[in-house]
Image (spheres, rainbow, N blue to C red):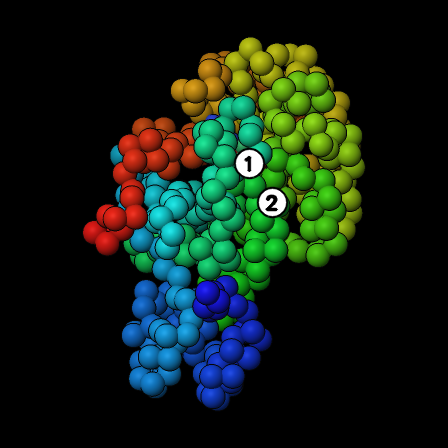
Amino acid sequence: MKQKPDIKSMNLAELTEFVTEAGQKPFRAKQLYQWMHQKMSVSIDEMTNLSAAFRESLKEEATYTVLKQVDVQISKRDGTRKYLFLLEDGNMVESVFMRYKTGNSVCISSQAGCRMGCRFCASALNGLARNLLPSEMLEQIYRISADTKERISNVVVMGTGEPLDNYDNLLRFIELLCNEDGLHISQRNVTVSTCGIVPKILELAHKKLQITLAISLHAADQQKRKELMPIANRYGLEDLITACQFYFDMTGRRITFEYSLLAGVNDSDGDADLLAKLLLGMNCHVNLIPVNPVKESGFGSPDKESVADFRRRLEQRGIQVTVRRELGGDIDAACGQLRKKYMEKGYIFETNLANL
Ligand code: SAH
């Protein structure tokens, strides 16, 4: 059976073609686009400036992607909200809403599951189910925006999944997210986090987007990195750093290096020195993240003093560092934990989709 086109993943040019092929005037495409991406409509029936006949034909001929909210956990400490959404095919993804002084931020998933296998990550435990469509990435933001009724100024692609393993859909997502007829988020307020797929970093550099690239480094030593992150077996540290340098040269955007601190694994003085040496002279910034312990992985988080020591040691060597504020510490905030909990409970089956 031929798949119906997913209109929420189309850019305006594609939508115009689709609309005119359906016998409509080209300007209808922009109206439809704004219903989807500005007003964030949950159904085609709401689109009252389109004729009833056209709306009916859209319902027949197109897929209109809307995510269903399965659960939300709200932190009493800081208002962080963790959402679990259901996709059309029964898969689930999670997304997080966070408040910062600089504005509200949404962290979205780029895949249902992940095949990168990082040892400390809950999302890796069940492997990859499938890539998310651009519409499904956007919808996480649209549903959260509608639910909170708050303006969202920053988007980070740091939830479940490896965004550069879903490269084409990621690029389309960014195009639609930043488009002036949609949410119109500035590229500078979009961060994409990758475990380090070198050829894709190079490809992305050529696009010269103004987004921030965040690299999950977690070790400044190739051997140690290989033990934590299987992707390091494919692409070594040296090539990764060269690719980052190239990204900076092409875009002028400062790279963020994420470094999850795992007690007794990568948090020693020697580890800090090695990291400083690796990054010295680069226009970059290090984000230290005390690891969120995941039951199955057995990694623990260093105490506050060790984190402060590690930070000081980097700063003394000229590296810019921030320690990620722990938001949502009282909810299942670590990547993939909420989704995993539901999957373990077998909460969602095809047969009870209708009840949601
Ligand atoms: N695949 C991408 C984006 C998703 S993971 C990437 O690897 O960057 C987002 C970030 O959270 C990554 O830096 C990842 O290494 C980190 N992370 C995953 N599990 C974590 C945990 N349990 N505690 C702290 N950070 C974790």
Q: Quadrant of residue 223?
A: top right
SS under mark 2: helix
Residue 149: percent from left, percent from top:
31, 57
Q: Quadrant of residue 174?
A: bottom right
Q: Is residue 55 left or right of residue 23?
A: left
Q: Which residue is denoted by mark 1 in the rendering?
A: 115
Indicate yes or no: mark 2 CB to ligand 1 under 8 Å: yes
Residue drawn at (68%, 28%) of the image: 232
Query: Which amino acid is tagged 1?
Result: Arg
Residue 179: percent from left, percent from top:
54, 66
SS under mark 1: loop
Q: How many marks?
A: 2
Quick one: 161 or 57, which is closer to the camera?
A: 57
Quick one: 90 or 138, which is closer to the camera?
A: 90
Residue drawn at (71%, 32%) of the image: 234
- The answer to whether residue 296 of the structure is visible from this angle is yes
Residue drawn at (34%, 35%) of the image: 343
Q: Is residue 315 left or right of residue 92?
A: right
Measured along the vertical axis of the image, is residue 320 above or below residue 170? above
* Residues at marks 2 and 1 touching, judged by CB atoms closer than 8 Å: yes
In the image, farthest residue toward the front:
1
How many angstroms separate mark 2 from mark 1 (CA)? 9 Å
Residue drawn at (55%, 79%) of the image: 17
Dot label at residue 165: 2
Q: Residues within 10 Å of mark 1 (few under 14, many from 20)?
A: many
Indicate yes or no: mark 1 CB to ligand 1 under 8 Å: no
Q: Residues within 10 Å of mark 2 (few under 14, many from 20)?
A: some
